[in-house]
Image (cartoon, rainbow, N blue to C red):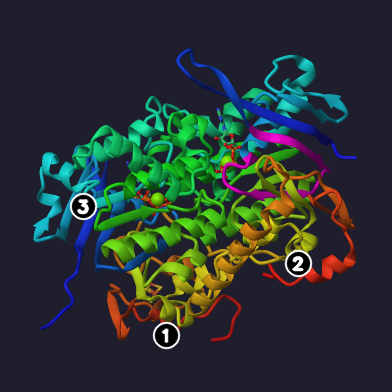
């Protein structure tokens, strides 16, 4: 059992249009997702851009409303309650924090960095101003920034520096789960390494969990215990890191893995050809992996800690497993 | 001397931000050239001045708080001398820019169609119908799903990656000969990233554009760039053709970067390589001597040049200083 359980979560946004601006249809941003989060573990969430990853994160912390489904925290139903000011939801509010994909727009431009980072501490703890300052300095140091940063405003920093400030703020309230939405995508490799090492260190120390959203499959592989691959609002494949990377089954997972850029410039032509081969395979086999409405099938058990969204009647035999086991090796 | 004519030439560019009464340079003497049909990648640590370099080429700095010197030569013009009206003609039409912060560069109150259409209106004389067709074509090219619907949406209704693709569509709208792309694909999944990079290559085949690609994703660099410039603290520290840079990286900063690439963990205590120390802020940055020396304190002082300059160590491979000859990682034998 996890301390957070997400059950059959759906988040649909209305599409308005026509002369009267009435609701014409819905975007099924998240369309039936299950997730169990245990303490001390990292869950990688990757997938197509626009597939609903941020929406899952925002719904868990209560910035978007669930259309249906439930979210449980320590057994308590907290669906659509995360922003509630009621005392009984206070622990949930403190324990679940998010690092936002768009660091700039998530920061109040009129606040100094000191206040940006200190905000969660002021909300949930009663530290003295001196203690707060000391903690902010520590946090800044951990994310590789100098003390002087405290008295500056967000616009005075580069994209990567602002992202680091976002990491420092998320950690400030000693949460149990951090939803990290592209936490290092604006960072260069060395600073990324610093932030990732730091995230793993505090995880070991405090048993923190992460829902780690990223387009960088190398980073996800480095960080995650379990991985979910998302496409069109649903999971196409879910399981242990090894199962998903070494034995990908869904055609979308294979396509994603084949598109990971290769660090060797001398083989780029061959790599491009292979990528385009898998893209063609995807186009050819799409109807085997999505229903007539283009919807991803329900997940089925495929192996130990490995779920794949296969066509219900498709045999999930090891024979098929062997046949499919050629592409996608990283 | 018969030299291939460059499309864009940046000479000794200095860009300083004002702190009280003094200016501190974020870009500190950068020179580079961009040729037709070429992708020049710029990589470097966060805060080293990449975006500042890009926005100053575009003439987008607030003149009250920024001091710029040097030259940005395009078609015999020094862009830094242009007035705002002339610059506006260049922007979008001759130089398309993809900004790092997609939300910040979109107008929250305008529909996607109106924003792309505005770029077309300004630089061409298409009628409404032609513009609509072109907007749809662009949205399709950048892989936006449901383009007819998305056209009518506002930026907040789009995912991070969809906004990024709208910004790319705007930059490419007028097929400019120069494209400056600041982290164009970091918000995108790898399949769409591949599609965008293919698209940039196609546009290049069609129009012969030169592209400055700012990214910290070395995989993207390896797959697309022709040449690479590595920046550290406002300066270029290494520049080489892409195969050469990956096969034979020389500057300690370049080597350190390559060493920090994430890998699958072997054990729980396995940590990624981190460069020692932090980048000083602009005010504290030492302007004399080697800027990278404090990050590799185990290298003896004598190994560094007093005032390191770029040396051409093999054809087209330039490295700042000579310290690379003595460099080794901490705990590693030379
Ligand atoms: N406020 C909103 N109103 C209408 N549609 C929305 C809204 N927010 C998101 N969407 C839609 O929901 C879908 C999922 O968006 P989401 O931001 O969760 O994607 P994502 O997986 O995080 O993508 P990316 O990797 O590009 O950040 C997209 O189709 C997007 O257009
Ligand atoms: N408007 C400004 N006022 C003062 N300092 C600034 C301003 N804009 C940027 N800086 C500083 O100039 C330096 C270079 O910033 P720049 O945005 O060019 O970095 P970058 O290389 O693009 O980094 P990143 O990879 O994180 O985007 C940084 O130290 C930053 O803090
Ligand atoms: S040798 Fe020169 S460039 Fe290299 S680290 Fe030392 S001072 Fe810097
Ligand atoms: Mg997102
Ligand atoms: Mg930048």
Taking the spot 66% from the left edge, 67% from the top edge, the residue there is B263
Chain under disc 1: B
Q: Earlier in the sequence, mark 3 or mark 1?
A: 3
Image mark for residue A246: 2
Which quadrant: the N terminus of chain B?
bottom left
Q: Is residue B162 magenta?
A: no
Taking the spot 75% from the left edge, 69% from the top edge, the residue there is B266
Which residue is under mark 3?
B94
Q: What's the magenta region?
A: A28-53
Measure how far apart labels 1 and 2 are at the Cα level. Answer: 40 Å
Say if A283 sits above or below B219 in the image: above
Q: Secondary structure at mark 3?
A: loop
Chain under disc 2: A
Q: Main secondary structure of the magenta part?
A: strand
Say if B85 sits above or below A321 in the image: above
Q: Is residue A111 left or right of residue B267?
A: left
* Residues beneath discs 3 and 1 located on the same chain: yes
Q: Residues within 10 Å of mark 1 (few under 14, many from 20)?
A: few
């Amino acid at each position: 059992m996890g301390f957070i359980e997400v059950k059959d979560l759906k988040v649909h946004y209305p599409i308005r249009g026509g002369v009267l601006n009435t609701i014409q249809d819905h975007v099924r941003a998240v369309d039936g997702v299950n997730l169990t989060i245990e303490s001390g573990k990292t869950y990688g969430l990757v997938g197509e851009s626009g597939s609903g990853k941020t929406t899952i994160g925002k719904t868990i912390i209560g910035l978007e409303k669930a259309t249906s489904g439930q979210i449980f925290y320590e057994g308590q139903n907290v669906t659509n309650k995360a922003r509630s000011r009621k005392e009984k939801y206070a622990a949930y509010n403190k324990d679940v924090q998010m690092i936002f994909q768009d660091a700039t727009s998530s920061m109040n431009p009129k606040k100094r960095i000191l206040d940006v980072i200190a905000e969660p501490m002021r909300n949930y703890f009663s530290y003295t101003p001196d203690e707060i300052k000391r903690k902010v300095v520590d946090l800044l140091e951990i994310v590789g920034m100098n003390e002087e940063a405290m008295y500056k405003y967000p616009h005075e920093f580069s994209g990567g520096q602002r992202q680091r400030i976002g990491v420092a703020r998320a950690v400030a309230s000693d949460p149990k789960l951090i939803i990290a939405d592209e936490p290092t995508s604006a960072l260069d490799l060395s600073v990324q390494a610093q932030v990732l090492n730091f995230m793993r260190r505090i995880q070991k120390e405090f048993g923190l969990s992460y829902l780690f959203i990223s387009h960088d499959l190398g980073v996800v592989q480095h960080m995650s215990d379990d991985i979910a691959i998302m496409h069109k609002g649903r999971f196409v494949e879910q399981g242990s890191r090894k199962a998903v990377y070494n034995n990908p089954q869904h055609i979308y997972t294979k396509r994603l893995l084949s598109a990971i850029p290769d660090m060797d410039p001398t083989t780029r032509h061959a790599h491009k050809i292979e990528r385009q081969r898998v893209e063609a395979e995807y186009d050819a086999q799409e109807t085997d992996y999505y229903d007539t409405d283009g919807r991803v099938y329900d997940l089925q058990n495929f192996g130990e800690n490995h779920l794949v969204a296969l066509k219900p009647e498709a045999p999930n035999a090891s024979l098929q497993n062997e046949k499919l086991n050629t592409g996608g090796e990283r | 001397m018969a030299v291939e004519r460059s499309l864009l030439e940046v000479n000794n560019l200095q860009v300083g931000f004002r702190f009280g009464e003094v200016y501190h340079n974020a870009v500190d003497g950068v020179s580079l050239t961009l040729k037709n049909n070429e992708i020049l990648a710029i990589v470097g640590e966060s805060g080293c001045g990449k975006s500042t370099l890009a926005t100053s080429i575009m003439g987008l700095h607030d003149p009250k708080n920024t001091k710029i010197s040097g030259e940005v030569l395009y078609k015999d013009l020094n862009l830094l001398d242009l007035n705002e009206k002339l610059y506006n003609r260049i922007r979008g039409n001759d130089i398309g820019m993809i900004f790092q912060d997609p939300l910040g560069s979109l107008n929250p109150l305008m529909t996607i169609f109106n924003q792309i259409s505005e770029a077309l209106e300004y630089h061409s004389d298409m009628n409404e119908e032609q513009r609509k067709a072109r907007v749809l074509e662009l949205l399709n090219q950048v892989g936006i799903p449901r383009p007819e619907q998305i056209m009518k949406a506002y930026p907040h209704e789009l995912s991070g990656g969809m906004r990024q693709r709208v910004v790319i569509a705007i930059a490419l709208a007028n097929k400019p000969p120069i494209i400056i792309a600041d982290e164009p694909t970091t918000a995108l999944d790898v399949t769409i990233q591949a599609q965008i990079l293919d698209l940039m290559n196609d546009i290049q085949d069609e129009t012969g554009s030169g592209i400055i690609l700012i990214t910290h994703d070395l995989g993207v660099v390896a797959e697309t760039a022709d040449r690479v410039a590595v920046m550290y603290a406002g300066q270029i520290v290494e520049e080489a053709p892409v195969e050469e840079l990956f096969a034979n990286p020389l500057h300690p900063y370049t080597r350190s970067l390559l060493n920090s690439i994430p890998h699958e963990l072997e054990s729980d205590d396995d940590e990624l390589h981190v460069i020692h120390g932090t980048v000083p802020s602009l005010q504290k940055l030492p302007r004399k001597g080697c800027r990278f020396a404090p990050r590799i304190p185990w290298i003896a002082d004598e190994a560094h040049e007093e005032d390191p300059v770029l040396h051409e160590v093999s054809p087209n491979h330039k490295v700042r200083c000579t310290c690379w000859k003595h460099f080794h990682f901490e705990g590693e034998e030379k």
